[in-house]
Image (cartoon, rainbow, N blue to C red):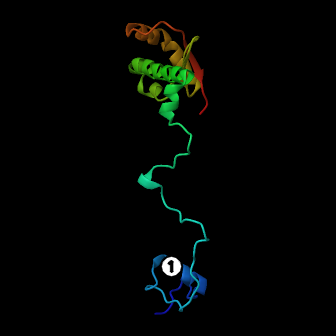
Amino acid sequence: MAARSVDGAGRRPCKRCLALVAEHKGADEFSTRPGAARLTLMPGRQPNTPPPSGRAPVTPGTLALRTALDQSPPLTALLQRLQQSRQRFAAIEAQLDDALRGAVRPGPLDDAGWSLLVSGGAAAAKLRQLLPQLQAQLRAQGWPDTPLRVRVQAR
């Protein structure tokens, strides 16, 4: 069987290329002379294979994220504040029109109040007009009365 053209211009591939292709696709597809060089792994090296069960390899002595969050009081408090911020946003989301809803995200909740992050100045101005309605909605749903801040955040 004649060697196939690699680049479509009729040029024949070199012996090393033929050996590589034959190694990859099987020797019956390509003609190689007996004793042609074959790629072999260096002694002591293993081929790249995916980890078992498709999961990423675990470094010994590391903790899973959930375990680390559960074992660290500061991280647990941070996670609770994040969840409360998302729950508060879900409570006021119905008060926002569609265009404004896409421009507003829940921000950090701290001792000084709760921030709403807005993508632009126009959306921030509209949201500032709605602040009394949003605070009333939060009070009606049982959330403590905390100051609402509007922060413009560039994306």
Q: Is residue 104 something that shows in the picture?
A: no
Does 150 sit left or right of 133 as displayed?
right
The front one of 48 and 60 is: 60
Residue wearing tag 1: 23
- Residue at 51% x, 23% y is 76
Query: 55 or 10, which lies in front?
Result: 55
The x, y position of residue 60, in whole percent, is 55, 44
Q: In the rendered view, would you say 37 is above or below 67?
A: below
Residue name at image x 57 percent, y 27 percent: 120
Residue at x-position 55% and y-position 79%: 20
Q: Position of residue 104 (x, y in %)?
A: 50, 25
Q: Position of residue 112 (x, y in %)?
A: 59, 11
29 lies above or below 59: below
Q: Nearer the viewer, residue 117 or 66?
A: 66
Q: Position of residue 69 (x, y in %)?
A: 51, 28
**What residue sits 59% from the left and 87% below the top?**
15
Query: Which amino acid does the dot numbered 1 rest on?
Result: Glu
Asked whether residue 27 appears in the rendered view, the answer is: yes
- Label 1 crowd (10 A; few <14 / some 14-19 / many >=20): some
Determine whether, in the image, residue 135 is placed left or right of residue 111.
left
| Res. 43 image quadrant | bottom right
Count the numbered circles shown.
Answer: 1
Quadrant holding the C terminus:
top right
Q: Please, what secondary structure does the residue beneath circle 1 have? A: helix
